[in-house]
Amino acid sequence: MAGRFSPRTPTPGHPRRASAPAPRPAGRTRVWAATKGPLDLALTLGPLRRGPGDPTYRTTPDGAVWRTSRTPAGPATLRLTATKDTAHAEAWGEGAEWMLDQLPAMLGELDDPEAFEPRHRLVAETHRRRPGLRLTRTGLVLESLIPSVLEQKVTATEAYRAWRLLVRGFGEPAPGAAPEGMYVMPDARRWAMIPSWEWHRAGVDSKRSDTVMRAVRVARRMEEAAAMEQTQAAERLRLISGIGPWTAAETLQRAIGAPDLVTVGDLHLPGIIGHALAGNRHADDAEMLALLEPYAGQRHRAVRLILLSGRTPPRRAPRFQPNNIAVL
């Protein structure tokens, strides 16, 4: 009988031709030429990614880097590609214009790589091989502060999982043409409304969730730190109980591109620096800071280069075990 096969059912042996992908909605665009050497998006923006499944950060097979942010003007999605020294950006959402205005700072235009002078062979060699390293400056504090709080005294796997669950559960889908599964993190009000059982479900103990709550309740004051120099900014963040030197450094390295702010209080970093520069895998914070003293003013850059060198001490101690507080 005619019409035996429905229009939606391919005839056996004649698979239906796949439909063309929908065109990407146009966003606001900007082309920006760097003035301080080659661009390397992965090196510069890599610290903004919180694990391989971060719903606010994505790289795609075409070489593009996608980011979402909660800007002062509203949510935004940003797509970035780069040639040797030119960035091509497209942005969507209420905060698109803000993101494009921030583009040079985000890609290291306010950084001063010429101020850095390698003092060790390892650092010099890595510096030579990584000419595109720039220190990013997002101009946004909470988007770096909250995941840094989640990373306090837990494994990276635990922290990344918590960030994924909370952003997907309480954020909003990324505006514009973002790849599927990308989200914008919640605003301060939404963070403050997350119930205790949802924090527990994400594997976040009350100490860390309470710290986030205290920070978002004074979100405007926290964001003001983005316009401060690093010492004053760190002092502002540390007014919040639960935010110490480690969290302040991890936040401000991203938010203001602080070139001299070293992460102290880290479980592994002193041993890595000690091993790389002095062959001492048992170095503490004091020895780490002494070894980095020749790089005063640029210690954060020196640490980034040492980490990029891959020179890490052999693992002998048992791995740090995840906390068993989640219900999943």
Image (spheres, rainbow, N blue to C red):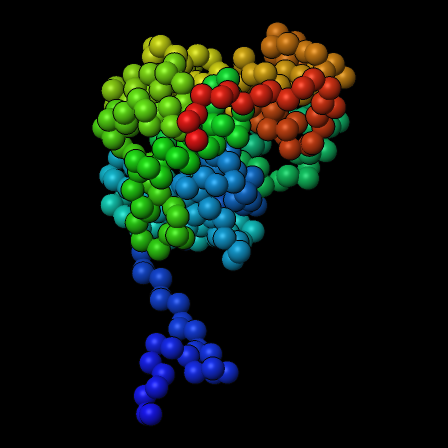
Q: Position of residue 3 (x, y in %)?
A: 32, 88
Q: Does residue 71 lie above or below 208 as drawn?
A: below
Residue found 36% across the figure and 33% down from its top: 166
Query: In front: 111, or 302?
Result: 302
Residue found 32% across the figure and 24% down from its top: 197
Q: Quarter of the image for the N terminus: give it.
A: bottom left
Q: Position of residue 257 (x, y in %)?
A: 46, 28
Decide if residue 237 is on the left or right side of residue 37. Answer: left
Decide if residue 12 is on the left or right side of residue 146. Answer: right
Residue found 27% across the figure and 48% down from its top: 93
Query: In front: 85, or 25?
Result: 25
Q: Position of residue 316 (x, y in %)?
A: 73, 19
Q: Decide if residue 23 is in sight here.
A: yes
Q: For residue 101, which quarter of the picture?
A: top left
Q: Position of residue 211 (x, y in %)?
A: 35, 16
Query: In front: 97, or 179?
Result: 179
